[in-house]
Amino acid sequence: MKVAILSLCLIFGLMLLATRGPLLWDAAGLALADAVTAAPLTAWGECERAHQTGRALLLNENYDAALPYLHTAVTCDDDRWAWFDLGRAQYALGQDEAAAQSWQKANAYGYVARLGATAGQNGDVAEAQRAWQTAVQIDPQQGQAYVQLGRLLQESDPEQARQFYEQALAVNADFAPAYYALANLHLRQFQSAADALPYFEQAHRLAPQNIEYLVVLARQMGGVDPAQAMAYWQKLADLAERQRPLAYHEMGNLYLRQGDAATAVHYRQMAVDLRPENAEFWQGLGQAYETAGCPAEARQAYEQVMTLQPDSRLAQNAKERLAELETAVGACSVTGNR
């Protein structure tokens, strides 16, 4: 009897397994999956909480307290923003090398560059230097950081500045700002216009639309090759409408130096016509007329200088020239509009 009962139970169990087996195995599989994924999901939640806590402390400038939370966040979740915040806390605590490593993982070179630029604009040279040195550690291939470090040291340590500029060119041989910085270094600190000129030319070649480069190059070229300088000033006049008055004024200066006062009057009159509020241009026109033997026209130009800037150095010079020309007479043979 017992054997019969056991046999019936066995048959019933086999039938249940045959009909419900797949559902039972699915339930077991889901339970196993939940057990496997629960730990990572819990870890992710802990990372997020650690990051948010650390970030809150960071924003309250409680850097020491923020640090362990942010370390926890980056340890269990390789998130860019966690690394970024960790770097901010480390930098605030003076841990510059560690901050550079964290910011490197966060790809935060641009943020540190802004720190350096802002400190420089505020006149905090030491903080600007610190930020740019950190930027170099984050990305040693960024020529911009070396140029900025050189500019910070150009007055106090010209030789070290030169090395930074050359390092910028070592990582990027076509970086125009580095050539321009080297040119200014040779011109101002090393007092060598001859050494500066090739660097000015290279900067202009690499960035032909840069107005600042072109203006300085044209001025430096004036004492070496007036014809080439004239071509540069004409290029500036064609390139930038707002710079045309300056270009014409300087072209007049070149013609004066070559002894062609009549042409100098022509260009300087063009400068005045475009920028009649500029006292320096009127001063230049007066000089050109005076050199051309036109005292009446020169007096009129100098009087404009005194009207526009009565208390300036230009006005004092104009007053002196007017005194010299008070009794001068002569018929002018040139005109400003040729």
Image: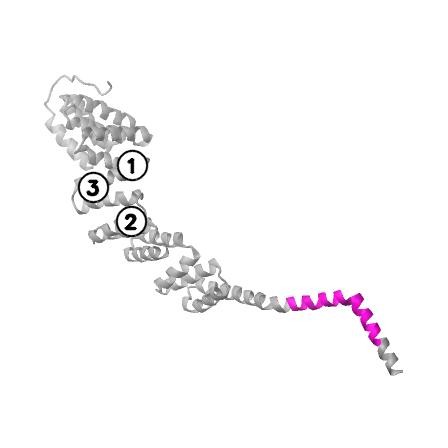
* Mark 2 or 1: the one toward you: 2
Image location of residue 157, percent across then percent down = 20, 54
Closer-to-camera residue (74/1): 1
The residue tagged with tag 3: helix, strand or loop?
Answer: helix
Residue at figure coordinates x 22%, y 22% from the top left: 266
Query: For the residues carrying marks 1 and 3, which lies nearer the camera in this image?
Result: 1
Query: In the rendered structure, which segment of residues is drawn in magenta?
Result: 9-33
Compute the Cα span from label 2 to label 3.
19 Å
Residue 84 appears at what percent x and percent y? 44, 59
Location of residue 221 with respect to 170 vertically, above or below: above
Question: How far from the left and from the top, in percent, is residue 311?
Answer: 20, 37
Q: CA distance from mark 1 to mark 3?
A: 14 Å
151 left or right of 255 in image = right
At horizontal 19% and vertical 24% (from top left) the residue drawn is 264
Q: Earlier in the sequence, mark 2 or mark 3?
A: 2
Numbered mark located on residue 196 in the image: 3
**For the residue marked with disc 2, what is the amino acid?**
Ala
The amino acid sitting under disc 3 is Ala
Residue type pointed to by label 1: Arg
Mark 1 Cα shell of 10 Å, populated few (<14), some (14-19), many (≥20): some
Residue under label 2: 170
Sequence order check, earlier mark of 2 and 1: 2
* Residue 244 visible to the viewer: no
